[in-house]
Image (cartoon, coloured by chain):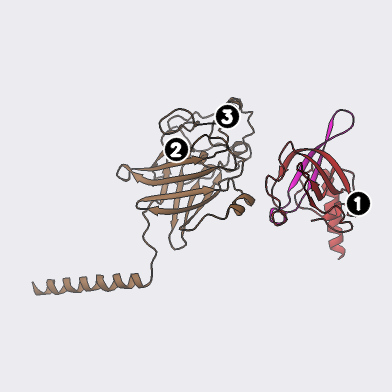
Chain colours: A red, B brown
Amino acid sequence: MRMRALFIVAVAALAPAAAVPAFAHHSYAEFDTDKKLTIAGTVKEFQWTNPHSWLLVNVPDGKGATEQWAVELSSVSLLASRGWRPKTVVPGDKVEVTFHPMRNGMKAGSYMAIKLPNGKTMGDTDRLGTAAQ
Amino acid sequence: MPVQRWFGHVAVAAIVVFGAASSVTAAPAAWPDLSGIYWTNSYSPKIVPVGGGDPPYKPAAMAEYRKNAEAMKTYSLDDKARKVCTPDGIPRILQSPYPFEIVQSPNRGEVHILYELNHVIRLVTIDKPLPSADELEIFPFYSGHSVGHFEGDTLVIETAGFNEKTFLDNSGAPHTDQLRTVERIRKVNGGKELEDVVTIHDPGVFTKDWSARFVYQPRPDLRMMDYVCGEKHRDLSPVKGVVQRR
């Protein structure tokens, strides 16, 4: 157990050094599952890939520019079983994404739910205290 | 010559018996032998349709192609196949000026095509249906998912389920995930050449289906080499049309 705890700490410590979303496989401890954050912005890129998919969203920063957020989703198979497809979101889509933010303050998080341009919502915005799916 | 006549009868009987035995064990139907190493002797960065001209692009796709082609000339196109060695996809891999090898495994019902360029491996499952439309959409591959069957001396390969991270050729021809290809591969010219006629279907960018033809020469004298993009490699001077960067 002690070794495992050390390992998780080590992985979490390394993660900030890597550019989001380059750390593809990592500990879930980086995300604060007791918190949720919702951003509204424009999809820059949707990476439909294993082991984890990524959604990059440009969000207005209130000063005329945008800042990029990276939201991590699950594996292709798991997403597909929940109704996702490679083009569920495409660049240019206006979306609202809810996620568990990272503990270290990076503009990234773990996906909980999304509101699509057609008004449809996928996922669960209320699931706190556990790893989001 | 009674002895010879007797021997002849035995030989015929043996053929009959062994012939029957082989049908009992249900050996796979003989496949035409297309296996071996092949290399083209000519190359063009642009894949030209049979009959010449441009592929039948829709206007928006033609505009995208022209933009890509300009960027390709200045090496500013985001061409991951040449920058990070991802697979070329089809039909781009068919125009490769590097050798490839066809490996036939009748007992497994599989044909593999191994390309020297970037170690691309294509698996062609014989006499099986393509995966479901859902599966093709969920698991898109650079080289797509291929199934094949033999029609006489021709290997027919149908491929679908491509991702959108590739170009159709070395001049930057675009495509969408609606791309589907059918290849007809056979030996021609008395076995001195291998022909691959590919039909390209992509209603996302083309107004109609079109075909291109590639010809390769059997090269049993060659050995497949190690190669990844960005490194110095095989001398391509025997391939007409190749301009090698120094």
Count of labels in the image: 3
Direction from residue A40 to residue A118 in the image, left or right: left
Range drawn in magenta: A51-78
A124 over B98 or under it: above or below: below
Task: For label 2, count other residues whose C-alpha is less than 10 Å away and answer few (under 14), some (14-19) or many (20+).
Answer: some
Q: In terms of image quadrants, where is residue A87?
A: top right
The magenta stretch spans residue A73: yes
Label 2 in the same subunit as label 3: yes
Residue lying furthest left in this view? B1
Residue A99 location (% of width, % of height): 84, 49
Whole-Å distance between the Cαs marked 2 and 3? 18 Å
**Residue under label 2:** B211
Task: For label 3, count other residues whose C-alpha is less than 10 Å away and answer few (under 14), some (14-19) or many (20+).
Answer: many
Is residue A80 visible in this depiction of the protein? yes
Name which residue type carries label 3.
Answer: Tyr
Label 2 in the same subunit as label 1: no
Is residue B98 visible in this depiction of the protein? no
At x 52%, y 54%, the residue is B130
Q: Residue under mark 2: which chain is it in?
A: B
**Residue under label 3:** B65
Whole-Å distance between the Cαs marked 2 and 1? 55 Å
Whole-Å distance between the Cαs marked 1 and 3? 46 Å
Direction from residue A91 to residue B149 in the image, left or right: left
Quarter of the image with the N terminus of chain A is bottom right
A126 over B24 or under it: above or below: above
* Secondary structure of the residue carrying numbered label 1: loop
Residue B47 location (% of width, % of height): 48, 33
- Choose the circle earlier in sequence order: 2 or 3: 3
Residue B25 location (% of width, % of height): 38, 72
Residue A35, disc: 1
